[in-house]
Image: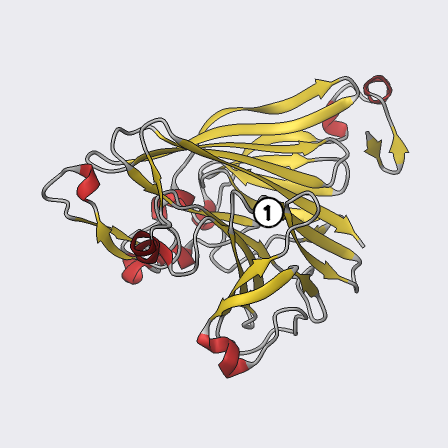
Amino acid sequence: MRIDGGDYTRRQLAERTGDLAAVGGVRAVTLDDGVERGIRALEFRTGGGLRFEVLVDRAMDIGVAEFDDRSVGWRSPTGFRHPGLHEYHDENGLSWLRSMSGLVVTGGLDHTLFGGTVDASDYRYPPKEGAWHALHGRVANIPARLTGYGERWDGDTCVLWAEGEVRQAAVFGEHLVLRRRVEADLGGTEIRLHDTVLNAGFERTPHMFLYHVNVGWPLLDEGARVATGAVRTVWESDSVREQGQGHEVMPAPLPGFVEQVYEHELRAGDDGRHRVRVTNGRIARGLELDFDPAQFPHFFQWLNLRSGDYALGLEPSTHAVGGDAAARADGTMTWLEHGEERRYDTVFRFLRT
């Protein structure tokens, strides 16, 4: 393990400290003020310059993320809002925007993208002819059952880890389970996210999944560059043409900016994986998102460059920008039978450039 510029074995670390926490580790904490009050979190410190928090009561999403004492994950004005304050049906389905902050906010498990009413006849409950969905679904505001966390040694390598289970279920409705494992190496500079979504119910159930990966200041700043490896852009919001802001070199915050959204077709690397990178030459830091196109065949880029909300979103997705109704109509919806599951393995690599 490389710690503070030196290479150490497990024994050498033990000789220097009686508690691994002097180097790094995982610590359970509870947020205790404002809209965040009561949220359980796991604080990861790798000793390699990386610190981040797993929000147990928010689907084990990643909130704070800092690298070399610089914030990387977006800190929005909503804060990490307690899920007990979330009102799913509020604001015509846009209430997700009152709980959106942090490096990773998950969309799903049965719906992503914009909402509406879709057929619910698979659940065989006559009073429930349709299912109404809000923006990006329910999962981000469901607390996890924490099944374990800590440090695991394998020879001279130490892995920091946490595991939990998020259950999205209703009587006469979906019964989907997200099993999430978060890993980081002691001395390391990357986060590994391993997710499995299982249909624990006995009715055929739709499944959609998305990571809203949010980069904020100071990594996002004037002159920051986004390299997607895009072959082409297959869709863009009307605001792209109206405002004309490009998606590769970022400007300073812009008053009144209207979000710009793109769906890019990406070129895979030699190993078959997609890598999207954000770099800032001024601070010589970056973030690389590494994911499997077989798991996430679609990718969106979100520009929210408005003053006070300044953010860049990188979004691997199971489905195209048309969302739930479109996926049902064109036959691309993922349907899970009882016991079927889907797996997702993604790496967040923090860079010194």
Q: How many numbered dots are placed on residues in this image?
A: 1
Q: Secondary structure at mark 1?
A: strand
The N terminus lies in quadrant: top right
Tell which of 1 and 261 is nearer to you: 261
Residue 119 visible, this orientation: yes
At which x and y percent is residue 205?
A: 30, 38
Q: Which residue is mark 1?
A: 64
Q: Is residue 333 left or right of residue 8?
A: left
Q: Amino acid at mark 1?
A: Val
Image height check: is 3 above or below 259? above
Can you tell which quarter of the image residue 307 is in? bottom right
Give the colouring mode of the picture: secondary structure
Neighbour class for label 1 at 10 Å: few (<14), some, many (≥20)?
many
The C terminus lies in quadrant: bottom right
x 88%, y 38%: residue: 5
Q: Is residue 310 left or right of residue 224?
A: left
x 66%, y 23%: residue: 151
At which x and y percent is residue 70?
A: 71, 53
At which x and y percent is residue 269?
A: 68, 49
Instruction: Tell which residue pokes out farthest to the bottom in this image.
Output: 242
Tell which of 113 and 106 is nearer to you: 113
Can you tell which quarter of the image residue 349 is in? top right
At which x and y percent is residue 348?
A: 65, 45
x 33%, y 58%: residue: 326
x 55%, y 62%: residue: 264
